[in-house]
Image (cartoon, helix red, strand yellow):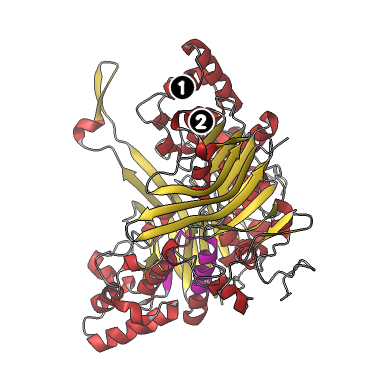
């Protein structure tokens, strides 16, 4: 399924948000002097990776680590501050929104909350027809109708319900409609931002099955953003673990779950509650996640890491490739201080 | 000695314009001192309503229409308002899902903790502050003296939930009802909070009712489990037994639907359809439209919760063979 062809390449992506507000908000008195200070949230810091055609690339991390920002920046929904985004060798981050239009049909997004992402005043028919008519101005209304029926059928919502409104559907069905909306323009690449987090277990399984089926039938490539590690393990081919705006480990799913190398990945994996297992010792992290406004120097994880030394405080670690195929950004792993 | 908490045939109804809805339909469970029970199910199963019914906090249009809630031998649902207030938040504490919603944003942590204590005990502010400091220390919050002067927004989500736990502990309750206490938190924080709650329950000999949809959390923290579906308990027993070897088709489906146990990439076992809304609960067994082993009797008759293995396991399913104790389709 997975090929060696790069569908999407991201180089040194940086995205910061200025939250300092107006000029007056930025001014403050310090030691009897008026200073102007800007506050920026450093959501994504120097991230590089590639996604191959046909694979499911997952990004995991805790809330606030910048995974959703990464997803949206990847699709150029947020303009990146620095870095390059290539879609099949074409650079897309420098394009105007008009020039981006042909790429929009190839890249689609599914959002977390099916209650918020569907327009409550539009029927399913209208919601689904909009992307089709917008991207293909010449399309006849009969063709649109056919396409809507076909896609609804594929996601398991009875096409007879096309004239109903979102509130008449349950959460699971709404998420099916969100998926249908993304499929309307026959995309190649879908970014799914926490698509099953708001759903119950039995419904979650239905939606995951649907996503996996759609991938097989249409050869889709997924970028899957989630905090649920058991879901990640089930569907992904490769996984990137994010912490405070940087990737700390990027590895094939199997390798990552068998031999996590980065201390943060190890702590994260040991925290998953397992079925039928009594409480086991999980690797405890010290303290709390620092704010992305004041990033720690050096390795962003150093103040919570059990193995941090002087170099970790000083120098930002780079992603290094290991023999197992994993890429780990950790001085300790690089220096062979940490046992696997 | 009687049970710490015993619920017998509890029924909760909501009186609406077009008629009455039954949210809880004959739920029975019991808890001894220091027991930890997990109440699991999907949204709409009635887990939270059960939790609220225990402390008599069902607000209109809902009401307890039948059954008993016995706590330390006292029938809670018959207690007058004032007497109930003396138990609620005192002998029984509650922890809710969202710590930002449960803490008052305009009062310091200290004020809220002292207020809680003084509502239940005649105690000086100074003594109350001392207890508050001790409980903050118990939930592993550093420099409690300084923290007491801070406001909820100055804490992170995990810290806030620790404070909520500390407040619940203030009056040394015999029972804590925790309604999805870690659902809003990240996994690493969840692991810490759950570990803390478990350790506290063990050291203080507190009973715990953990309401959650997360089977993983339940299997790590509780000894007993009750699985709810559409207002009824469908399976109950020891957590290890029920999760390791589920018998009811709904419990089975729920556990099989989890991605963890399967070969990555394979199709997940899904339960078709969805939980019925209260307005149209199917006749007979409420699960029968989604069940893969249903028989004719399931469509007309509601199955009773029957005990197996000396009542160590309770199952409500017509298709469970009483003599063998296993589902006939296996």
SS label for mark 1: helix
Left or right: B33, with A251 as reference point? right
Q: Earlier in the sequence, mark 2 or mark 1?
A: 2
The one of B187 and B249 positioned closer to us in this rendering:
B249
Specify start and end residues of the magenta stretch as a single range.
Answer: A189-212
Q: Quadrant of the N terminus of chain A?
A: bottom right
The one nearer the camera, A111 or B125, is B125
Residue underneath mark 1: B119
Q: Residue A100 sits in which quadrant?
A: bottom left
Q: Are marks 2 and 1 in contact (CB under 8 Å)?
A: yes
Query: Tag on residue A313?
Result: none
Instruction: Pinpoint the chain carrying mark 1.
Output: B
Going 61% across and 56% down the picture, which residue do you hit? B227
Q: Is residue B103 visible?
A: yes
Label 2 sits on residue: B89
- Quick check: is A193 in the magenta stretch? yes
Q: Position of residue A202 (x, y in %)?
A: 54, 65
Q: Is residue A4 left or right of residue B34?
A: left
Label 2: which secondary element: loop
């Amino acid at each position: 399924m997975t090929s060696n062809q790069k569908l999407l390449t991201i180089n040194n992506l940086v995205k910061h948000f200025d939250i300092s507000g107006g000029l007056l908000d930025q001014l403050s008195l310090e030691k009897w002097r008026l200073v102007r200070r800007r506050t920026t949230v450093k959501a994504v810091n120097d991230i590089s990776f590639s996604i191959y055609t046909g694979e499911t690339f997952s990004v995991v991390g805790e809330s606030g680590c910048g995974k959703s920002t990464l997803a949206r920046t990847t699709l150029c929904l947020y303009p990146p501050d620095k870095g390059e985004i290539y879609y099949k060798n074409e650079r897309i981050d420098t394009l105007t929104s008009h020039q981006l239009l042909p790429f929009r049909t190839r890249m689609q997004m599914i959002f977390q909350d099916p209650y918020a992402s569907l327009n409550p005043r539009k029927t399913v028919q209208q919601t689904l027809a909009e992307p089709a008519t917008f991207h293909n101005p010449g399309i006849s209304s009969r063709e649109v109708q056919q396409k809507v029926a076909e896609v609804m059928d594929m996601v398991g919502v009875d096409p007879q319900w096309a004239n109903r409104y979102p509130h008449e559907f349950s959460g699971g069905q709404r998420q099916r409609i969100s998926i249908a909306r993304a499929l309307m323009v026959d995309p190649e690449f879908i970014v799914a931002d926490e698509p099953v987090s708001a759903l119950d277990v039995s419904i979650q399984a239905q939606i995951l099955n649907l996503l996996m089926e759609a991938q097989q039938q249409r050869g889709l490539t997924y970028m899957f953003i989630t905090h649920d590690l058991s879901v990640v393990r089930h569907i992904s081919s490769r996984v990137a673990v994010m912490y405070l705006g940087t990737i700390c480990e990027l590895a094939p799913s199997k390798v990552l779950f068998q031999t996590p190398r980065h201390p943060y990945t190890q702590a994260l994996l040991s925290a998953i509650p397992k079925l039928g297992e009594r409480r086991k010792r999980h690797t405890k992290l010290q303290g709390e996640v620092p704010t992305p406004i004041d990033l720690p120097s050096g390795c962003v994880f150093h103040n919570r890491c059990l193995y941090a030394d002087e170099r970790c405080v000083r120098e930002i670690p780079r992603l290094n490739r290991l023999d197992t195929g994993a890429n780990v950004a950790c001085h300790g792993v690089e220096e062979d201080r940490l046992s696997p | 000695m009687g049970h710490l908490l015993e619920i017998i045939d509890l029924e909760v109804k909501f009186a609406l314009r077009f008629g009455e809805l039954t949210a809880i339909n004959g739920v029975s469970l019991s808890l001894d001192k220091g027991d930890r029970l997990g109440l699991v199910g999907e949204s709409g199963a009635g887990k939270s309503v059960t939790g609220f019914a225990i402390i008599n906090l069902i607000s209109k249009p809902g009401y307890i229409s039948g059954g008993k809630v016995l706590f330390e031998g006292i029938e809670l649902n018959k207690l007058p308002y004032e007497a109930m207030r003396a138990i609620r938040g005192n002998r029984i504490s509650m922890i809710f899902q969202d710590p930002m919603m449960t803490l008052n944003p305009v009062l310091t942590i200290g004020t809220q903790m002292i207020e809680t204590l003084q509502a239940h005990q005649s105690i000086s502010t100074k003594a109350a502050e001392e207890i508050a400091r001790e409980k903050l220390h118990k939930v592993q919050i550093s420099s409690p003296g300084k923290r007491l002067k801070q406001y909820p927004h100055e804490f992170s989500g995990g810290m806030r939930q620790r404070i909520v736990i500390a407040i619940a502990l203030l009056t040394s309750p015999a029972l804590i009802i925790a309604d999805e206490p870690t659902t809003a938190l990240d996994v690493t924080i969840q692991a810490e909070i759950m570990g803390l709650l478990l350790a506290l329950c063990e050291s203080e000999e507190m009973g715990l009712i953990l309401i959650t949809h997360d089977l993983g959390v339940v299997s790590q923290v509780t000894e007993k489990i009750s699985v709810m579906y559409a207002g009824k308990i469908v399976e109950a027993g020891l957590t290890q037994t029920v999760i390791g070897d589920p018998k009811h088709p709904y419990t089975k489906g729920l556990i099989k639907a989890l991605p963890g146990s399967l070969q990555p990439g394979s199709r997940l076992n899904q339960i078709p359809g969805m939980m019925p809304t209260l307005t149209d609960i199917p006749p007979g067994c409420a699960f029968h439209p989604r069940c893969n082993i249903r028989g004719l009797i399931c469509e007309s008759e509601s199955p009773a919760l029957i005990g197996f293995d000396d009542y160590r396991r309770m199952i409500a399913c017509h298709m469970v063979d009483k003599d063998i104790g296993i589902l006939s389709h296996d």
